[in-house]
Image (tube, rainbow, N blue to C red):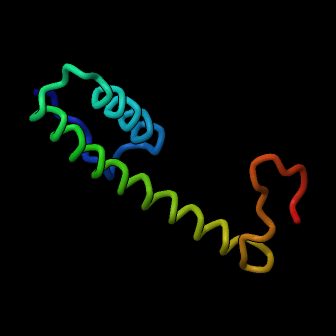
Amino acid sequence: MSKEKPITDRSFQDLEDELSQLVEALEQPDTPLEQALADYERGIKVLREAQKRLDAAEQKVMMLSPDGSESSTLEPGDDEPE
């Protein structure tokens, strides 16, 4: 078995890629139950780490916003800040 970096040492993109791979594996009808459960458990761990990083990034953006709120951030499809 190859040694992988701990989840906390991996980039956000690596976490996102692993989640995609795990979802693909879980969608396969021939995946054995034990493997599906192990993949699901791993996916939850990876998802929690990714969510922690997104939350931290959101906090940083809020701190850097002129008024300390999210109101100056763009939403998908917006052309300009509000």
Residue 59 in the image: state x and y as whole percent: 58, 70
Tell me the residue at 42%/52% (across/down). Answer: 50
Side (left or right) of 7 relative to 57: left
In the rendered image, the quadrant that contains the C terminus is: bottom right
Tell me the residue at 36%/55% (across/down). Answer: 49
Residue 22 in the image: state x and y as whole percent: 31, 33
On the image, which quarter does residue 65 sit in?
bottom right
In the rendered image, the quadrant that contains the N terminus is: top left
Residue at the farthest bottom position: 67
On the image, which quarter does residue 36 sit in?
top left
Tell me the residue at 33%/48% (across/down). Answer: 46
Residue at the farthest front position: 29
Of 62 and 27, which appears nearest the observer?
27
- Examine the rendered structure and indicate whether residue 64 appears above or below residue 75: below
Side (left or right) of 65 relative to 50: right
- Examine the rendered structure and indicate whether residue 10 appears above or below residue 23: below
Of 45 and 8, which appears nearest the observer?
45
Residue 54 in the image: state x and y as whole percent: 51, 58
Residue 75 in the image: state x and y as whole percent: 76, 55
Tell me the residue at 28%/31% (across/down). Answer: 26
